[in-house]
Image (spheres, coloured by chain):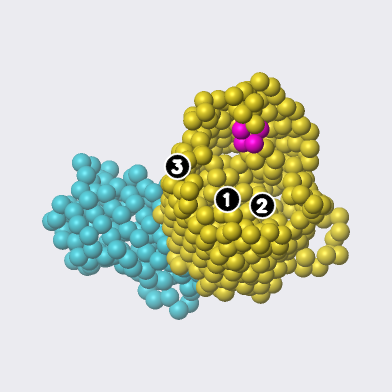
Chain colours: A cyan, B yellow
């Protein structure tokens, strides 16, 4: 986190409860609703699934995915944002093509460039539209995504569904690569468009 | 009766097997490639591979290419080594022109009622060239013509196209119309019975548009290219449309329609169809296409064509295919035919691979069976 964009606001606050764990493109989402906030937490991520839909410049798309999402969140005790963060290990993202994996990690995400580049984290997560005492529901979330040394706010739809062990959370948001200073992915005439769609699903459960 | 059966069987086999097989490969849906243009210059697939397509063939699809050298990330267009024409022996001599030389020495054994036939031949021998700059593509092929009477050479495709950055495209020239799924086997019932075989290119104009996850292609033409060039009696207006929607990177639906006006020798006809493909894993693809072929005139009627192709990558570079197919009789004079096809495609390297195909065809109307065994060495230089 030492290479954050100088214009990024509230860096200190965002890093406050950072866990060194893993991280990724994350997207995190909110663990919200549904009794989760009421119960307090901390809520840990289990059964995670992170997918990034990458539209190609020549038409069609491919999906990059990983299950290396980790982190914990604690329901807000007065504030509106969850404490904690979610992180994705960018070294584990798999596109189904080995050369594309290499390029994604080394050329575009530059996971070895500096500490923190190998993960993406989502913090300052807030949920809207999902009542804490609901058994589930749909709403929106927002958070601060740190990726490629840059922190930007993201927002998107979120859905929470109660399960036996906690809550199943699903959230998604568009991610503009140029916002994070990621070089335009292009190889032998085939490229990825500037905006990709991130979808994160996990179960939030107590330890 | 035996003579008639033999004649029908030979005709069926003749039209089924004399041709180039592997071109576009819908089985690569399993690798998250829903569009032909990822690897081919042609929007409809087949023919010359782009540098990216060659690279993918080498590094990701061939059995022994996983450790091969590749251009560094970010390079725009720098085929070399195994990704280049003749292993890059010509260096930069060709400038922006990309070339490919395709050749298929083949052996075919046909079994039919009362006999069998063996043949060794060069299935195709084509030199293909393409230049792509600033959205423009100029594409053409020239090769030996093994079947058309009086023709030593043929150019199956030659066209000029332009595609904007937003995915709107137009091309004009000679090409195979977009319809359904272009199975690599040209003798698949959805190609051979719907006039989408190796010699069925048209002269025409095609407009296409990529809108998010969907692709629309519309073509208008004065007729089949060979008819326009050599036989006015078979020349007639035709138009086709194809729409593809990618539900996910490994699942797509396709709707198609084709209208051919009457010619002096052929009745008016129309085809409508749908196809669905999905890849449950990165090593398996299942495509199914169903089409209704409607014809006017004394031999009119509606026949149905259904083709399923299930492909499994049993080992890196070894694909096994199973394909049940049926064409119903429709109007008078046509037979209901059924096929079971099995194929093994072994892709050791980009520049050479093998295909072993077995076809069992059953004529349900006349009640006789034929079978064929085809072995191909595919050289792609």
Q: Is residue A166 left or right of residue B236?
A: left
Label 3 sits on a secondary structure element that is loop
Residues shaded magenta: B8-12
Compare marks 3 and 2 and give the one earlier in the sequence: 2
Depth-wise, is mark 3 or mark 2 nearer the camera? 3
Q: Is residue B338 visible?
A: no
Q: Is residue A22 above or below residue B2?
A: below
Which residue is rendered at x = 76% and y = 56% of the image?
B154
Relative horizontal placement of residue B139, taking residue B369 as reference (left or right): right
The chain ID associated with circle 3 is B
Given residues B116 and B46, the one toward you in this image is B116
Residue in view at x 54 percent, y 52 percent: B33
Task: Describe residue B144's horizontal placement relative to residue B320 as left or right.
Answer: right
Which badge, 1 or 3, comes first in the chain's sequence? 1
Farthest left residue in view: A133
Q: Report if the CB atoms under discs 1 and 3 are less than 8 Å apart.
A: no
**Image marks 1 and 2: residues in contact by CB distance under 8 Å:** no
Mark 1 neighbour class, 10 Å CA radius: few under 14, some 14 to 19, many 20 or more: some
Report the magenta stretch's main SS: helix
Pointer 1 residue: B195
**Quadrant hosting residue B177:** bottom right
At which x and y percent is residue B354? 71, 36
The label shown at residue B199 is: 2
Seen at 76% across and 49% down, the residue is B149
Q: Which residue does the numbered mark 3 point to in the structure image? A: B330
Q: Residues within 10 Å of mark 3 (few under 14, many from 20)?
A: some
Separation of residues labelled 1 and 2 (CA atoms): 9 Å
Q: CA distance from mark 1 to mark 3?
A: 16 Å
Residue toward you, B286 or B233 = B233
Q: Secondary structure at mark 1?
A: loop
Which sits in the foreground, A51 or A26? A51
Drawn side of residue B121 relative to residue B73, left or right: right
């Amino acid at each position: 986190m030492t290479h954050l964009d100088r214009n990024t606001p509230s860096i200190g606050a965002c890093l406050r409860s950072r866990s060194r764990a893993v991280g990724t493109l994350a997207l995190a989402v909110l663990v919200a609703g549904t009794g989760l906030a009421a119960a307090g937490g901390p809520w840990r991520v289990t059964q995670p699934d992170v997918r990034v839909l990458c539209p190609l410049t020549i038409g069609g798309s491919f999906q990059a995915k990983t299950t290396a999402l980790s982190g914990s969140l604690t329901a807000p005790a007065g504030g509106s944002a969850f404490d904690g963060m979610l992180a994705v290990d960018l070294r584990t993202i798999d596109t189904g093509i080995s050369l594309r994996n290499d390029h994604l990690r080394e050329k575009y995400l530059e996971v070895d460039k500096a500490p923190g580049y190998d993960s993406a984290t989502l913090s300052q997560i807030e949920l809207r539209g999902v009542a804490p005492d609901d058994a589930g529901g749909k709403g929106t979330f927002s958070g601060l995504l740190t990726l490629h040394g840059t922190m930007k706010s993201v927002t998107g739809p979120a859905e929470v569904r109660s399960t036996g062990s906690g809550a199943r959370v699903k959230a998604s948001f568009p991610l503009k690569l140029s916002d994070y200073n990621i070089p335009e992915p292009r190889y032998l005439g085939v490229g990825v468009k500037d905006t990709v769609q991130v979808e994160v699903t996990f179960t939030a459960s107590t330890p | 009766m035996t003579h008639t059966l033999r004649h029908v069987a030979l005709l069926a086999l003749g039209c089924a097997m004399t041709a180039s097989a592997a071109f576009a490969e819908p089985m690569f849906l399993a690798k998250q490639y829903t569009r032909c243009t990822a690897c081919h210059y042609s929007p409809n697939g087949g023919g010359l591979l782009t540098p990216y397509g060659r690279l993918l063939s080498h590094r990701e699809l061939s059995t022994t290419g996983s450790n091969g050298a590749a251009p560094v990330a970010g390079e725009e267009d720098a085929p070399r080594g195994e990704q280049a024409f003749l292993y890059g022996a010509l260096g930069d001599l060709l400038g922006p022109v990309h070339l490919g030389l395709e050749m298929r020495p083949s052996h075919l054994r046909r079994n039919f009622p009362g006999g069998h036939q063996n043949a060794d031949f060069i299935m195709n021998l084509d030199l293909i060239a393409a230049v792509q700059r600033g959205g423009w593509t100029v594409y053409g092929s020239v090769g030996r013509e093994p079947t058309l009477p009086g023709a030593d050479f043929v150019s199956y495709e030659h066209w000029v196209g332009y595609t904007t950055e937003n995915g709107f495209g137009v091309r004009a020239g000679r090409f195979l119309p977009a319809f359904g799924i272009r199975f690599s086997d040209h003798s698949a019932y959805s190609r051979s019975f719907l006039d989408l075989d190796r010699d069925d290119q048209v002269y025409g104009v095609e407009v296409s548009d990529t809108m998010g996850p969907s692709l629309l292609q519309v073509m208008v033409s004065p007729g089949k290219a060979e008819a326009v060039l050599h036989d006015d009696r078979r020349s007639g207006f035709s138009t086709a449309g194809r729409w593809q929607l990618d539900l996910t990177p490994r699942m797509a639906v396709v709707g198609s329609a084709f209208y051919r006006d009457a010619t002096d020798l052929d009745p008016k006809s129309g085809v409508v169809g749908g196809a669905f493909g999905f890849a449950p894993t990165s090593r398996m693809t299942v495509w199914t296409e169903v089409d209704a072929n409607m014809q006017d005139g004394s031999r009119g009627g509606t026949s149905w064509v259904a083709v399923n192709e299930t492909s499994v990558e049993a080992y890196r570079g070894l694909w096994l295919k199973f394909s049940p197919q049926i064409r119903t009789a429709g109007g008078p004079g046509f037979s209901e035919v059924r096929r079971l096809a099995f194929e093994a495609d072994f892709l050791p390297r980009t520049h050479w691979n093998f295909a072993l195909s077995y076809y069992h065809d059953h004529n349900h109307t006349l009640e006789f069976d034929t079978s064929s065994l085809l072995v191909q060495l595919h050289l792609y230089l």
